[in-house]
């Protein structure tokens, strides 16, 4: 089964994808995480991708698509996968359909997360991630802070802020690009009848965990 996460930055995509991945035993394939790992290791892919990421721009499809194809071909992604951060535009979505069709698969479920805009910026600025590549748990300094400041509850590694999360201009660029390039995917998948939209908000008290629980119930029905 192929599940796809849609939703602007800071809506909780990574959190929900992580919870689903844990429960279902399928990998969470986050293009942003794969890029960041390559940047840290200074691979040719990472050096190239960082030219775009540091400015809050999308990495070109010529780099992104083959990277996702490789990841989807790995053995652990055969039973199911949760794509987080891909596709980000119509061209990538069409490409994904082609790739999956070749394997006799399709996108089965698209989870579209929304959040009030004022909460989104606040959440991105307050986001901290575990620096341990094998853990990568996300925290929020106001919503769900770690027990011990600056330290991951799960593995004890140091928490860090992503470079593109500390720069307000880069955040605004990413949100604009989301509206322009990624939002059309909501209609694209709605037409296919696989879209499920969920709002996450502190105001209503419906958080990532609630959404993940409901989706799991639906899948296991
Ligand atoms: P966010 O959703 O907060 O922007 P991600 O971790 O999903 O963070 O992505 C970080 C950056 O990696 C993006 O700003 C973009 O530059 C790049 N990126 C991630 N996924 C894609 C993609 N599918 N296509 C192009 N660029 C991508
Ligand atoms: Zn950790």
Image: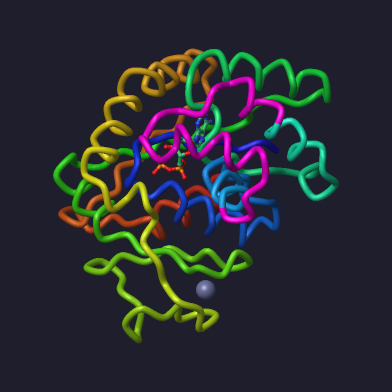
Magenta range is 40-66
Residue at left 55%, top 80%? 155
As drawn, is 55 to the left or to the right of 171?
right
Q: Does the magenta stretch include residue 176?
A: no
Q: Where is residue 219 in the image (x, y as percent from the top left)?
A: 60, 45
As drawn, is 74 to the left or to the right of 212?
right
Q: Where is residue 188 in the image (x, y as percent from the top left)?
A: 47, 15
Residue at left 48%, top 26%? 88
Image quadrant containing the N terminus: top right
The main secondary structure of the magenta stretch is helix
- Note whether 98 is above or below 210 in the view shown: above
Residue at left 47%, top 51%? 14
Q: Which of 42 and 113 is in front in this view?
A: 42
- Note whether 181 is above or below 157 in the view shown: above
Q: Does the magenta stretch include residue 44?
A: yes
Residue at left 67%, top 46%? 43
- Residue 65 in view in this figure: yes
As drawn, is 98 to the left or to the right of 116?
right
């Amino acid at each position: 089964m192929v599940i796809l996460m849609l939703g602007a930055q800071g809506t909780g995509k990574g959190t929900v994808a992580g919870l689903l991945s844990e429960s279902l035993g399928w990998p969470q394939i986050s293009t942003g995480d794969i890029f960041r790992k390559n940047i840290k290791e200074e691979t040719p892919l990472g050096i190239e991708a960082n030219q775009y990421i540091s400015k809050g721009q999308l990495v070109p499809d010529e780099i992104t698509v083959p990277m996702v194809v490789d990841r989807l071909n790995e053995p652990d992604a055969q039973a199911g996968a949760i794509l987080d951060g891909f596709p980000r535009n119509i061209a990538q979505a069409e490409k994904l359909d082609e790739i999956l069709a070749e394997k006799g698969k399709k996108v089965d479920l698209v989870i579209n997360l929304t959040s009030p805009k004022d909460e989104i910026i606040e959440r991105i600025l307050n986001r901290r991630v575990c620096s341990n590549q094998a853990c990568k748990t996300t925290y929020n300094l106001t919503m769900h802070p770690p027990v011990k400041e600056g330290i991951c509850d799960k593995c004890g590694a140091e928490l860090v802020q992503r470079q593109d999360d500390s720069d307000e201009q880069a955040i605004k660029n990413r949100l604009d690009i989301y509206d322009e390039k990624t939002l059309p995917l909501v209609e694209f998948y709605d037409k296919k009848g696989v879209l499920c939209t969920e709002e996450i908000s502190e105001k209503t008290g419906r958080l990532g965990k609630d959404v993940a629980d409901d989706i799991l119930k639906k899948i296991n029905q």
